Image: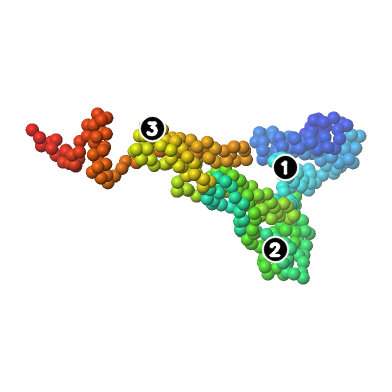
Amino acid sequence: MSKRDYYKVLGVNRDASPEEIRKAYRKLARQYHPDVNKSPDAEQKFKEATEAYEVLRDSGKRANYDRFGTADPGAAGAGFDGATGGADFGFNDIFDMFFGGRRANPNAPRQGADLEYRLTVSFKDAVFGKDMELTIPRTETCSTCHGNGAKPGTHPETCSECRGTGQSESIQSTPFGRIVNKRICQQCGGTGNIIREKCGDCKGSGKVKKRKKIQVNIPPGIDEGKQLRIAGEGEPGVNGGPPGDLYILIQIKRHDFFKRSGDDITCELPITFVQAGLGDEVVVPTLDGKKAKMKIPAGTQTGAEFRLRGKGVPRLYGNGQGDQRVKVKVVTPTNMTEEQKQTLREFGQLSGDYISEQNNSFFDKMKRAFTSD
């Protein structure tokens, strides 16, 4: 193995602090570890850096090295040949070295899961808003055992395998030193506790399914697909963590007469041929129950659209509201009396319109067209 200057191997000054030495080694280890770097000389450089770090990180070995140019016999251990004196790495150090972070503690507080509830409201309630009481199914802390999962009168015991840490350790010797692996304890499942007698209500989980009533304000102007967030009404947290949130997804029922287009309300109003031709003032129903008057100009065509200002949807979390758009549809009269028909004939003649009152069907007309000479 190369006996280059250990300080040069790590790229640090001779007066470097232990933290600077550690950072320098971690950088080289990430760069040359054989599992990461497949170049031919990567393994040799990794071993060389590890040997240098093993000596310089120990104050006694470093003092001997600075004084004599080498550590005391055996100070560097058997190195990578004997695999007994290598660096003692923790699993978290290796994880941090290659992935930039540390494995989460299984007993650390965690926020509870979020919940989603689909709420169907009427068209009118979506427009004008409404205060509602909802019954939400969710998980809550067991009131019998207060969340510890043990039968009343008993208590959870600290796990003898992991001593309450929720993690078990195993040490493995490798050509690169000893690696300490930390895993979730199999005996307690990572909780750190053993429950000998489980609570009869929650069966040892510390949580039970319940239905909770909550008050919800549906704001005026809410639209289909919008979500309302109710903070803290989700699933309870784990290990003392905060609860999750409740998200209410809004769905809106269809209305028989009105439709919505953004902040406007639309509707279709039938009018007679006479109203369309001569003009009229009509009464239009509105969503708030109040009837509004609207003028139909003479000569209005079917499909014409008129606006009732301020009769639409309130702007969500804003000021003002949209309009009500009224589309008129001219209704053709049916089952007219002879007198009514005669009046229309006279109107047609005055207008210069040619009126054919033959009652032959379409197929009769086609037949004559093909059989005539």
Label 1 crowd bin: few (<14), some (14–19), many (20+), radius 10 Å: few
Q: Nearer the viewer, residue 117 or 313?
A: 313
Q: Position of residue 173 (x, y in %)?
A: 74, 49
Q: Distance from label 2 to label 3 (Cα)? A: 73 Å
Q: Position of residue 132 (x, y in %)?
A: 61, 54
Q: Distance from label 2 to label 1 (Cα)? A: 35 Å
Q: Nearer the viewer, residue 190 or 289?
A: 289
Q: Where does label 3 land, which residue? A: 298
> Is 65 above or below relative to 287?
above
Point out the frontmost of discs 2 and 3.
3
Q: Quadrant of residue 368?
A: top left
Q: Is residue 255 left or right of residue 364?
A: right
Which structural element holds mark 1?
A: loop
Label 2 amino acid?
Answer: Cys
Q: Position of residue 27 (x, y in %)?
A: 75, 35
Point out the frontmost of discs 2 and 1.
2
Give the numbered dot on residue 101. Answer: 1
Give the residue at x 19% y 42%. 359
Label 3 amino acid?
Answer: Ala
Q: Nearer the viewer, residue 204 or 74?
A: 204
Q: Where does label 2 land, which residue? A: 142
Counting residues from the start of the chain, the first of labels 2 and 1 encountered is 1
